[in-house]
Image (cartoon, helix red, strand yellow):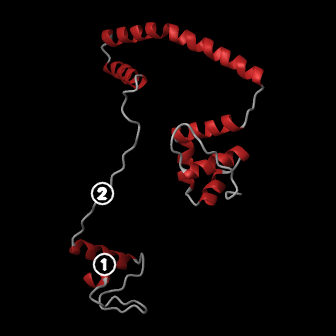
Amino acid sequence: MDIINAALPEAYPGGYVRHEWKILASLVQKDPSVNKKAIAEALGYSYQTVLGWFKDARYQQYESWVLRGIVPDLPKEELEKRADAYARVHDKFGFHAEEMQDRLLNILETTDDVRIQKEIAQDWLDRAGMGAPKTATRSGISVQISPELAEEFLTRAREAGLFAIPTEGTVVPGDDSTSADSPASAL
């Protein structure tokens, strides 16, 4: 997989794009059937990370822009015909949008179902651009273990033979754990 010589599109109007996404989109452009595991291996990321990129809406918008902007796949007449059809459909939606809002408002005010009220309110806020941000938050946790509990864990691990943990007073060759600075000396 030729990552080094991948042509990277420059001026994306949607804002900042990760360098990895630029490489990924250029590889997909060259070969749409490229293996995602091979991409992950070539980029040095896990397979799950690359799958997450493919599912990310921002990456999908960028990839769509790269593919549309660089590969004109339809003749000009066909593009004009589709643009005209899109404009007609858009006009119909615009014409009926106010009526649909009134219907939703009527349902919102007359229904007793709290779930339906919630769905309508959330949808309305989302369409107005005031919905809750769709980002997952990550937070770390901190665990404090007493010295007695740590010793109990080590004793059980030794008894189970999970891994070689020396008993107290045992000197392991090549290990300078007898110094006062060593973390092992605290055990």
Viewer-nearest residue: 107 or 4: 4
Q: Which residue is mark 2?
A: 141
How packed mark 2 is, by other alpha carbons closer than 10 Å (few <14, some 14-19, many 20 or more), is few
Q: Is residue 146 visible?
A: yes
Rendered image quadrant of residue 148: bottom left
**For this rendering, which residue is in front, 52 or 3?**
3
69 or 32: nearer the viewer: 69
For numbered disc 1, what is the local secondary structure? helix
In which quadrant of the rendered image does the C terminus lie? bottom left
Q: Is residue 1 visible?
A: no
Quarter of the image for residue 83 reads top right
Query: Label 1, on which residue?
Result: 155
Q: Is residue 175 left or right of residue 52?
A: left
Callout 1 touching callout 2 (CB < 8 Å): no
Mark 1 surroundings: few (<14), some (14-19) or many (≥20) residues within 10 A = some
Query: Where in the figure is residue 11, as x and y percent of width and height?
Result: 59, 42
Q: Residue at image x 43%, y 91%?
A: 174
How many numbered callouts?
2
Q: Nearer the viewer, residue 157 or 35?
A: 35
Indicate the amino acid at tag 1: Thr
Q: Residue at left 57%, top 52%?
A: 20
Mark 2: amino acid = Ile
**How many angstroms separate mark 1 from mark 2 (CA)?**
25 Å
Return the x and y of residue 39 as percentages of the image width and height: 64, 54
Residue 77 lies left or right of residue 43; in this view the side is right
Kindly report which numbered mark, 1 or 2, lies closer to the viewer in this rendering. Answer: 2
Would you say 150 lies left or right of 175 here? Answer: left
